[in-house]
Amino acid sequence: QVRMVASGGGSLQAGGSLRLSCDVSGYVASGYCMGWFRQGANKEREKVASIDSYGMTTYADSVKGRFIISGDNPKNSLYLQMNSLQPEDTGTYYCAAVSEWTAAAGRCPENLGEGDIQYWGKGTPVTISS
């Protein structure tokens, strides 16, 4: 059974930094495609960043240059370093992974979205004040 637990959220002023962590267990795919999504109030959940077995990373345009996704063997631990945080970054952040079947290819699906995700971690809230 795959379990993903996100942590590291908090409240701070604009311009600050946070590092989110996601502890992963039970993910036994030969490869991986994992990522972070977020959902703000009255907004749809959106992909923030993703990483695959080949080290390929992708970012939403709104966070490029500010956020960095990484992993310590991402099938065990996934991170999101968030710098220069802005009020529009406020939301609940979720770590996520595709199914083991999809992950076997080692790459994320093109235009990775919610529909590609098999496993979700419980969200961690981030609140940025101006």
Image (spheres, rainbow, N blue to C red):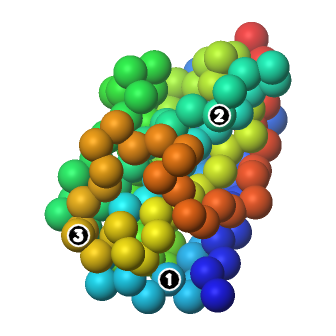
Residue drawn at x 34%, y 37% is: 111
Q: Crowding near pointer 2: few (<14 within 10 Å), some, many (20+)?
A: some
Q: Which residue is mark 2?
A: 45
Query: Can you tell which quarter of the image residue 95 is in?
Result: bottom right
- The reply, left or right, for residue 83 in relation to residue 127 is left
Amino acid under label 1?
Answer: Tyr
Q: Quadrant of the N terminus?
A: bottom right
Q: Which comes sooner in the sequence, label 2 or label 3?
A: 2
Amino acid under label 2?
Answer: Arg
Are the residues at dot 2 and dot 3 in contact (C-beta closer than 8 Å)? Answer: no
Amino acid under label 3?
Answer: Ala
Q: Which residue is mark 1?
A: 27
- The reply, left or right, for residue 111 in relation to residue 122 is left
Q: CA distance from mark 2 to mark 1?
A: 23 Å
Secondary structure beneath label 2? loop
Which numbered mark, 3 or 1, is in the foreground of this view?
Answer: 3
Q: Position of residue 27 (x, y in %)?
A: 50, 83
- The reply, left or right, for residue 84 in relation to residue 44 is left
Query: Can you tell which quarter of the image residue 23 is in?
Result: bottom right
Are the residues at dot 3 and dot 1 in contact (C-beta closer than 8 Å)? Answer: no
Q: CA distance from mark 2 to mark 3?
A: 25 Å
Query: Can you tell which quarter of the image residue 129 is in?
Result: top right
Secondary structure beneath label 3? loop
Q: Which comes sooner in the sequence, label 3 or label 1?
A: 1
Are the residues at dot 2 and dot 1 in contact (C-beta closer than 8 Å)? Answer: no
The reply to whether residue 128 is in sight is no
Q: Which residue is mark 3?
A: 105
The numbered mark at residue 99 is none
Q: Is residue 66 above or below residue 92?
A: above
